[in-house]
Amino acid sequence: MDKKEQELRAQMCEIGKNLFNKDFVAANDGNISARLSEKEILATPTATSKGYITPDSIVKLDLDGNILEAKEGVKPSSEVKMHLRCYKAMKNCNGVVHAHPPYATGFAIKGEVLDKATMPEVVIAMPKIPLAQYGCPSTEEIPDSVEPYFGDYEAVLLESHGALAWGDTLMNAYLNMERLEYIAKLTFITRSIDGERELSKERIDELVALRPKYGK
Ligand SMILES: [Zn+2]
């Protein structure tokens, strides 16, 4: 196993621990993947808490979902289909994180798009979190529902289910999931104190002009 693969496997375990410690997943929920090469990905195993993944339990797959390498008896998550769609459709996608973070999932259950210009980081980094239409887990319905958002967004709510984030690196996919949940949490908090207040158009425009400096 080369150094890149070793590092990715270790990083997937670390991110799994973060999802677990931050309460972004319950029991065995959620899954993480990373692109290893143009046609190979690494994905977390099914039926395992993301807080307790080991590097050797991670499965290697091709982009059609065929298992290339796995510890005996270990299978990838059945939700890996939405990860595969991300890698197939977006050449610059190198990491995907699926979780059920509670505030974001609350809005996904309510069925609300999060798009209020509440603070600078929101306007600059994630001005809109769309809502991908409900799909039955483990089928092609979820990949079909998220694909329209590829390219323009880096994270979506999955209606009545949870959230999906992707990025040009695995770490950025994880950070997009963190930001998505943070925005949902702040929206929830501000609504408990009379609701969110948006920045003025002038202030939004000056932040939009700053986006290139942040790599957006
Ligand atoms: Zn899920």
Image (tube, rainbow, N blue to C red):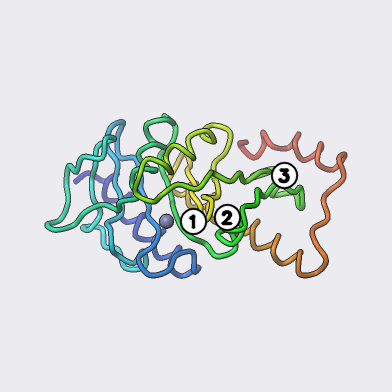
Q: Which residue is mark 3?
A: 123
- The x and y percentages for residue 92 are 44, 32
- The amino acid marked with disc number 2 is Ala
Q: As rendered, which of 43 and 109 lies closer to the eye? A: 109
Q: As rendered, which of 159 and 52 lies closer to the eye? A: 159
Q: Earlier in the sequence, mark 2 or mark 3?
A: 2
Q: Quadrant of ligand 1?
A: bottom left
Measured in 3D between alpha carbons, the distance from the residue under mark 2 to the one under mark 1, in whole angstroms, is 7 Å
Count the numbered circles shown: 3
> Residue 114 has which mark?
none
- Specify whether 9 is left or right of 167: left
Q: Which residue is mark 1?
A: 161
Q: Are marks 2 and 1 in contact (CB under 8 Å)?
A: yes
Q: Dot 1 lies on which element?
A: loop
> Residue 108 has which mark?
2
Q: Can you tell which of label 2 and label 3 is closer to the viewer?
A: 2
Please say if 51 is above or below 80: below
Measured in 3D between alpha carbons, the distance from the residue under mark 1 to the one under mark 3, in whole angstroms, is 25 Å
